């Protein structure tokens, strides 16, 4: 119903029939929330999910969590927060072009890194080792714990009470597992198209922007980048678009063209797959012969080579690896300190011990920390000089 200039939520829901493709998830067909709530007069359900994620503490903490470089090293390096915002923008572009549900794709993108530990993937691997006998640690599963349990905002339920589709989209790898379910509903074999969009946007975004940060940090040089076929393609597009490119802007322009190249290739490839398989519902997307989102066979080897290049020259560069390894060694000592002295954790964490167990509670507590707070706690408990365990 429309009153004056105000468009109601119901009017927006009704408009989806004309705006969205048949394979897109429609708001009215959502499997809902664990705890039923009255629907909002003006905001659609996935829009509410997005807003709850944006207002969560876990989202704010992403500002001080490592993307590649330990947080605080330099003002312009990406953090988990800036990566997430950039990835959400790419997700919206893909969703809009493919007539998928933009609100849902954006919500999944904004929540996708909420479960990341401090100190990036090195921190995640260390927590997985520490929790090896207790279910391990995976940042995707941890993201689901964040939105279902660890956030404290509402009096009637734990977590954010997000819709099923957003929570399912956080379980990045679980859909491929035979018989995987969430709340009794099947997860696969493939996710909703909107979750596939967020997943692909994650991969495309970090490749382009990590290369930008790597050059800014002096770990990557122009000759090294120029030797990569994927970079050569982006540089050729940059020269074709701009008659003159000042030397001090060449890398930034090429990064822009690289991301644009990746997104346009993904759109063409995904559109061709969708047209070939002609899904008529989200269920058809789940059971399609292949994942419907992806890049072309022609681009795939160049993408793989560029990833290998970044791993060799950036992620495993001694200056990055040594800093991350040292931070992770200190994080391990902090984890063991809380196991031995649980009284030094926050009150909310201590209250979860009877239900969750000590090790899982400590894992939740440490995983939720920013790089900065973890280092402050290490300093407070004088753990720098503690012998490794």
Image (cartoon, grey):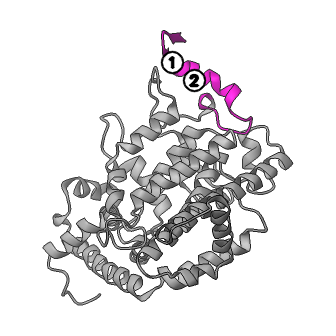
Front-most of residues 84 and 186: 84
Front-most of residues 224 and 359: 224
The stretch of residues the image draws in magenta is 1-28
Q: Residue at x 64, y 48 (%)?
A: 94
Q: Residue at x 63, y 69 (%)?
A: 235
The answer to whether residue 225 is above or below residue 252 is: below
Q: Is residue 369 left or right of residue 124?
A: left
Q: Residue at label 2?
A: 12
The quarter holding residue 307 reads bottom right
Front-most of residues 264 and 253: 253
Q: Give how far across and how far down residue 273 sits, in percent.
A: 80, 52
Q: Quadrant of the N terminus?
A: top right
Does residue 183 appear in the picture of this structure? no
Q: Is residue 331 left or right of residue 231?
A: left
Front-most of residues 338 and 233: 233
User: Disc 1 to disc 2, how far (Cα)?
Assistant: 6 Å
Q: Residue at x 52, y 72 (%)?
A: 211
Q: Give how far across and how far down residue 85 sits, in percent.
A: 45, 52
The answer to whether residue 203 is above or below residue 292 is: below
Mark 2: secondary structure: helix
Q: Is residue 152 left or right of residue 252?
A: left
Mark 1: secondary structure: loop
Q: Residue furthest front?
A: 244
Q: Is residue 22 magenta?
A: yes
Tag 1 near tag 2, CB within 8 Å:
yes
Disc 2: CA contacts within 10 A as few (<14), some (14-19) or many (>=20):
some
Q: Is residue 111 left or right of residue 236?
A: left
Q: Residue at label 1?
A: 8
Does residue 48 appear in the picture of this structure? yes
Q: Residue furthest right?
A: 276
């Amino acid at each position: 119903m429309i009153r004056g200039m105000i468009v109601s939520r119901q009017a927006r829901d009704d408009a989806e029939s004309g705006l969205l493709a048949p394979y897109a998830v429609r708001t009215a067909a959502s499997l809902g929330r664990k705890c039923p709530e009255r629907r909002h007069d003006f905001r659609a359900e996935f829009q509410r999910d997005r807003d709850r994620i944006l207002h969560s503490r876990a989202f704010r903490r992403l500002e001080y969590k490592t993307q590649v470089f330990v947080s605080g090293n330099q003002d312009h390096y990406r953090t988990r927060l800036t990566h997430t915002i950039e990835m959400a923008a790419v997700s919206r572009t893909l969703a809009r072009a493919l007539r998928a549900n933009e609100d849902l794709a954006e919500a999944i993108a904004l929540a996708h890194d909420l479960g990341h530990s401090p100190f990036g993937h090195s921190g995640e691997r260390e927590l997985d080792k520490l929790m090896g006998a207790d279910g391990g640690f995976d940042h995707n599963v941890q993201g689901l714990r964040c939105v279902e349990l660890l956030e404290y905002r509402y009096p009637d339920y734990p977590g954010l009470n997000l819709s099923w589709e957003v929570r399912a989209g956080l379980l990045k790898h679980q859909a491929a597992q035979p018989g995987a379910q969430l709340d009794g509903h099947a997860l696969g074999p493939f996710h909703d198209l909107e979750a596939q969009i967020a997943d692909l946007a994650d991969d495309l975004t970090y490749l382009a922007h990590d290369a930008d940060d790597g050059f800014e940090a002096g770990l990557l040089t122009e000759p090294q980048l120029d030797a990569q076929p994927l970079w050569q393609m982006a540089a050729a597009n940059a020269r074709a678009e701009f008659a003159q490119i000042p030397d001090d802007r060449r890398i930034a322009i090429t990064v822009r063209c690289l991301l644009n190249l990746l997104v346009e290739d993904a759109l063409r490839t995904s559109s061709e797959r969708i047209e070939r398989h002609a899904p008529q519902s989200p269920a058809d997307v789940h059971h399609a012969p292949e994942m419907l989102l992806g890049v072309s066979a022609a681009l795939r080897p160049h993408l793989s080579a560029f990833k290998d290049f970044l791993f060799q020259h950036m992620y495993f560069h001694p200056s990055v690896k040594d800093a991350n390894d040292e931070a992770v060694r200190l994080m391990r000592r902090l984890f063991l300190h809380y196991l031995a002295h649980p009284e030094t954790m926050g009150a909310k964490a201590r209250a979860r011990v009877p239900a969750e167990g000590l090790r899982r509670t400590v894992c939740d507590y440490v995983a939720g920390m920013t790089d900065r707070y973890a280092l402050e706690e290490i300093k407070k408990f004088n753990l720098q000089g503690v012998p490794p365990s």
